[in-house]
Image (cartoon, rainbow, N blue to C red):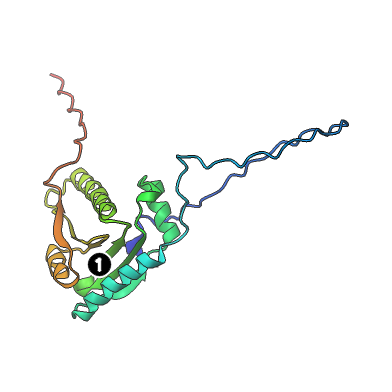
Amino acid sequence: MPARFLLTTALFAALLAGCSREEAPPSSEPAAAKPPAPAAAPAADAAPPVREDWDAAALKVAEDLAAKIRAAGTPCDEYDTAPYQAFAADYSVRLEMPLEHLPLAEASCTAPEEEDLTFSVFADRAGAERYLEFHRRLLCRRAKAMNLADFPGIPFVLGDRWLIRPDERTTAVALADIVGGDAGLASCEEDKIVEEKVEPDPAPAE
């Protein structure tokens, strides 16, 4: 299992709590005939069904993108799909991302100079943009907390429903020429992050 997929090595176990029903005490009186209860209508705000694995069609999109990159002469070695259950648990529990915002597929391969290329596929472009912004905010906050003033942001190639995240900005531009899409940099300088309040240090006692 490639370590690049997981934000943590711990796997979160999902446990389903069963609901117990209390049995009604038996009655000696004959039960009155009752008409069958009507079928309950589904709730309007019912949550979408929880996926248990990546979407097969979305995985094919990621594989096709990797194939185009290889066909153009750029290595995309060690291609592998992220382990869905560990990935979903890591993002939903540790990073508190709603499960419905997760990609429909996520895979990765290794380019020259050990550069990682991460492929994420969604239902539409809006989902890809939201996922990119989530990572931009997260990494820019961490860079600021670690005083990494030279952290440039996240290079990307954004397609109609997919996102490729290489390590280098020049790679993003090169990949856009191969697979199409828009190359760019999700920069921390385009600061959309809410500034965290920092309490001033107490004045030294005289």
Relative to 142, is 58 on the left or the right?
Answer: right
Task: State the residue in front, 109 or 145.
Answer: 109
The C terminus lies in quadrant: top left
- Which residue type carries mark 1? Asp
Q: Most extreme residue toward the front, as rendered? A: 35
The residue that disc 1 covers is 116
State the residue at coordinates (43%, 52%): 89
Q: Residue 205, located in which quarter of the rendered image?
A: top left
Q: Is residue 203 above or below residue 59?
A: above
Instruction: Tell me: residue 1, above or below residue 141.
Output: below
30 relative position to 41: left or right: right
The local secondary structure at tag 1 comes to strand
Task: Determine the residue positioned at 41% across, 47% down.
Answer: 93
Asked whether the viewer can see residue 2, the reply is: no
Of residues 178 and 167, the one nearer the viewer is: 178
Viewed as shown, does residue 20 lie left or right of 157? right
* Relative to 97, residue 202 above or below: above
Residue at 45% across, 39% down: 45
Residue 54 in picture, x, y percent from top left: 41, 62
Identified at 37% across, 44% down, the residue is 96
Q: Could you say where residue 14 lies in the image, as x and y percent from the top left?
A: 51, 51
* Extreme residue toward the right, this view: 28
